[in-house]
Amino acid sequence: MPAKKLSESEIKTLLSNAKGWSLVNGKLHREFACKDFVTAFGNMTRVALVAEAMNHHPEWSNVWNKVVIDLNTHSVKGISDFDFVLAEKINEIFEPFPPLGLPGSGKGQ
């Protein structure tokens, strides 16, 4: 199924549910700070495997623990449904487990 270019109103609606993503220079944009370089690079590798399977590749950069990602779809010259699908998968990779807040864990006490 080919990518579907989204209207401004569709983008606005989907963006409200895309945790951490914003619209910058006509692209979906998000920055992640990881605990270190190995974690950042490992997450990028996991994203690369998903992106390749989708045949939909991000524009991104990495400096030490910081990963900056921009998404748009060149074939439709804008933001498509593919961008939001990939953004959701990226969020799952970079934020796989929320803090549980269990007693003794130091979280949520």
Image: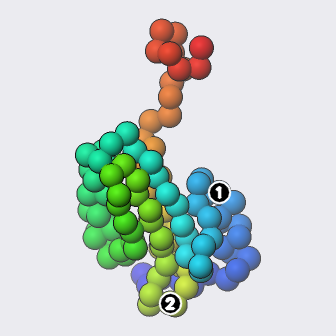
Q: Position of residue 2 (x, y in %)?
A: 44, 84
Picture layout, residue 81 above or below residue 2: above
Please indicate whether residue 36 sits to the left or right of residue 71 in the image. left
- Camera sees residue 88: no
Amino acid type of disc 1? Answer: Asn
> Residue 17 — which label?
1
- For label 1, the crowd category at 10 Å Cα-Cα, with few meaning under 14, some 14 to 19 and many 20 or more, is few
In the rendered view, tell whether residue 37 sits above or below residue 27.
Answer: above
Numbered disc 1: secondary structure: loop
* For residue 38, above or below residue 90: above
Q: Where does residue 13 sit, x and y in percent of width and height? A: 71, 67
**Left or right side of 62 for 68:** right
- Residue 50: x percent and y percent? 32, 62
Q: How many numbered marks does the figure carry?
A: 2
Task: Residue lying at the far top in this picture: please name it.
Answer: 104
Kindly identify which residue carries mark 2: 76
Q: Which of marks 2 and 1 precedes in the sequence?
A: 1
Element on which disc 2 rests: helix
**Residue at position x 52%, y 90% from top?**
77
